[in-house]
Image: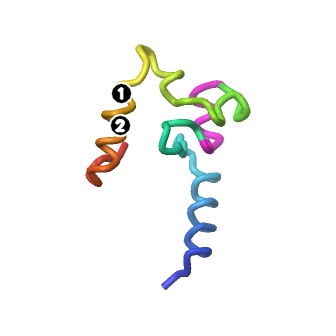
Amino acid sequence: MAERGEWSGLFAAAFRQSRNAMALLDGERCFVDVNGAYLTLLGYRRRELIGQPVFRFVVGGPLASRAEWRSMLNSGQFNG
């Protein structure tokens, strides 16, 4: 079985090398990291996204309020 450090490295490599757009968000829905495919898709530079809330880039704003988001995360059944 792979140790945590090995899994972390595998995930990081897959994230960076993927041709699928991928983003990592924190609990407040702010960008922590994005891969190259995501940058190409959105047409922004990494520094323009990191630390920004993802809903700033969604037409019409967030689909869930802060309370709704927290409730979904706390339910253990939400992903997206």
Q: Nearer the viewer, residue 12 or 72?
A: 72
Q: Which mark is residue 69?
A: 2
The correct choice, above or below, for 10 with respect to 53 in the image is: below
Q: Give the structural element (helix, strand or loop) at label 2.
A: helix
Q: Nearer the viewer, residue 16 or 8?
A: 8
Relative to 69, 43 lies left or right: right
The correct choice, above or below, for 37 with respect to 49 in the image is: below
Crowd class of label 2 (few under 14; some 14 to 19; many from 20; radius 10 Å): some
Crowd class of label 1 (few under 14; some 14 to 19; many from 20; radius 10 Å): few
* Whether label 2 touches label 1, CB < 8 Å: yes
Give the residue furthest to the top: 60
Q: Which mark is residue 65?
A: 1
Q: Nearer the viewer, residue 37 or 29?
A: 29
Q: Quadrant of residue 31?
A: top right
Q: Quadrant of residue 10?
A: bottom right
Q: What is the span of residues highlighted in magenta in the rendered image?
A: 32-43
Instruction: Please tell me which residue is depicted at 57% across the width and 45% down the height of the picture.
Output: 19
The correct choice, above or below, for 64 with respect to 35 in the image is: above
Instruction: Please tell me which residue is depicted at 48% across the width and 85% down the height of the picture.
Output: 1
The alpha-carbon separation of the residues under discs 2 and 1 comes to 6 Å
Instruction: Please tell me which residue is depicted at 65% across the width and 41% down the height of the picture.
Output: 36
Give the residue furthest to the front: 67
Query: Is 10 colored magenta in this rendering?
Result: no
Q: Amino acid at mark 1?
A: Ser
Q: Amino acid at mark 2?
A: Trp
Relative to 73, 28 lies left or right: right
Q: Give the structural element (helix, strand or loop) at label 1.
A: loop
Please provide percent x and percent y for residue 17: 63, 53
The image quadrant where one finds the C terminus is top left
